[in-house]
Every structure is written in C-alpha cells, then in structure tokens.
Image: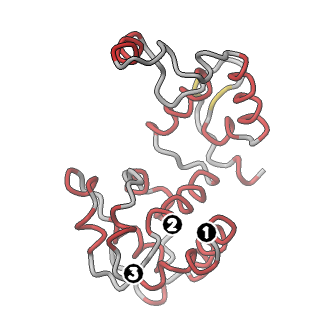
Amino acid sequence: MVLKSNEYNKEFSEAIVNAGIDFLGEDKSNSFKRCYQCGTCTGACPSGRITGFRTRKIIRQALLGDEDLLSSDDLWMCTTCYECYEKCPREVKITDLIKVIRNLASEKGYIAEPHRKTSLYVFKTGHAVPVNAEMKKARLDLGLTEVPPTTHKYPEALQMIKDIMSDLNFCKKVGICEETGELTELDLKYASE
C-alpha cells in the first residue's frame, strides 16, 4: 500500500478516534497515533502466523486515514486475543481500536460473512455456538448439566435477546431478516437512511 501525503485522509483518521472515545476514552482512542510501525504486534499475532494478516498494516491504514480499511477482509482476521495489545512497546490499544474500526465498518455495511453467520446463531439460539448433541455429551462427561443455564435452559430468554437485537437495529446491520430468521443480502447503503 502506497499513499502519498496528499492522499492522507485526516477526517477518517479522526473519525476512528472520535468513534472510540466513548468506548475507550480519549487517550486509548488516540493511542494508535503513537505507533512507529516496529512490527511487534504483527510478530505476536497468532492469526498472522497462519494467514496474511498483518496487524501493523491495520494501524498504518488507520494512521493514514485509508478508508479502504473498512472493506478489508483483514479487519475481520483479528481474533481479539490481545497479544498485540500486551506486547506493544508504545502501548497502542490495538485490539480495542480494531473493534472500533469494525464498528465503523459495520455501520457502512461491511461485515465478514462468518461474523454474520455467528450473529445469526445468536439470533436463533442465543449462543454464538449452538449447543448440539456432541456438546451436550461433553458437558455431561465433565459433570455439568446437559445444557448451560442460558437460553437453552430458559427459552423465554431467547425472545429477550431478539428484542434487544431488534431495539439496537442489529439485525438490519448484519442482514438478518427478523421474520424468517435467515440472512439477507446486506444493504451497504442502509447507514445513510
């Protein structure tokens, strides 16, 4: 990625900071500006060891205000393990900033398909990973109840989860049809409505 200084988009870079202030506070939200691209985050990243994901590239794009970052598949390869966060010599709050940038991306309709499918599981079952027969057996083998004390034990709680998702406009953001409980075509323009 080569960006010339006249291509720097300060507005987008500041939008990242502003979007993170409520979530992180001003100092943490501005922390990515301290990055000097040493690569410690990339070296620490378990996802980067098996994929082409480069943590410092995300930070570099944020610093330069590169809005292509919002539609980048790389943004969704972070596992939020916080390895980069813990190893950064400049105390850049990388993982939290990636979450902020993901929120900005989702507001524009850019969400990785596996994340959409996980959201659908939450909508349908109240869990990101549904409890299937194999999981139930494993729980029993561990001396636990067959199902966890969540929506599986208290099915009425699932409607509460669906109501919260609806109130937050979450289903529209990730492209879930509330009536059918299926994924729909994601509307990249809904944010401008």
- Label 2 Cα neighbours within 10 Å, binned few <14 / some 14-19 / many ≥20: many
The colour scheme is: secondary structure
Contact, mark 3 vs mark 1 (Cβ under 8 Å)? no
Q: Residue at x 26, y 64 (%)?
A: 44
Using the image, determine if residue 182 lies above or below residue 112. Answer: above
As shown in the figure, which amino acid type bears the numbered disc 2? Leu
Q: Nearer the viewer, residue 97 or 116?
A: 97
**Of helix, strand and loop, which one carries label 2?**
helix
Q: CA distance from mark 3 to mark 1?
A: 28 Å
* SS of the residue under disc 1: helix
- Image quarter of residue 29: bottom right
Q: Nearer the viewer, mark 3 or mark 1?
A: 1
Quadrant into which the N terminus falls? bottom left
- Residue drawn at (35%, 75%) of the image: 88
Three-letter amino acid code at the position of disc 3 = Leu
The residue that mark 1 highlights is 24
Q: State yes or no: discs 2 and 1 in contact (Cβ < 8 Å).
A: yes
Residue receiving disc 3: 3
**In the image shown, does 61 or 136 lie closer to the viewer?**
136
**C-alpha span from label 2 to label 1:** 9 Å
* Residue under the point 38% across and 50% down: 79
x%, y% of residue 61?
43, 73
Left or right relative to 178: residue 2: left
Q: How many neighbours does mark 3 have within 10 angstroms: few (below 14), some (14-19), or many (20 or more)?
A: few
Q: Earlier in the sequence, mark 2 or mark 1?
A: 1
Q: Residue at x 42, y 51 (%)?
A: 76
- In front of the other: 146 or 19: 146
- Which residue is situated farthest in the left direction here? 49
Around disc 1, counting alpha carbons within 10 Å, would you say few (fewer than 14), some (14 to 19), or many (20 or more)? Answer: some
Judging depth in this view, the residue of 126 and 179 nearest the camera is 126
Q: Find disc 2 in the rendering and name its residue.
A: 97
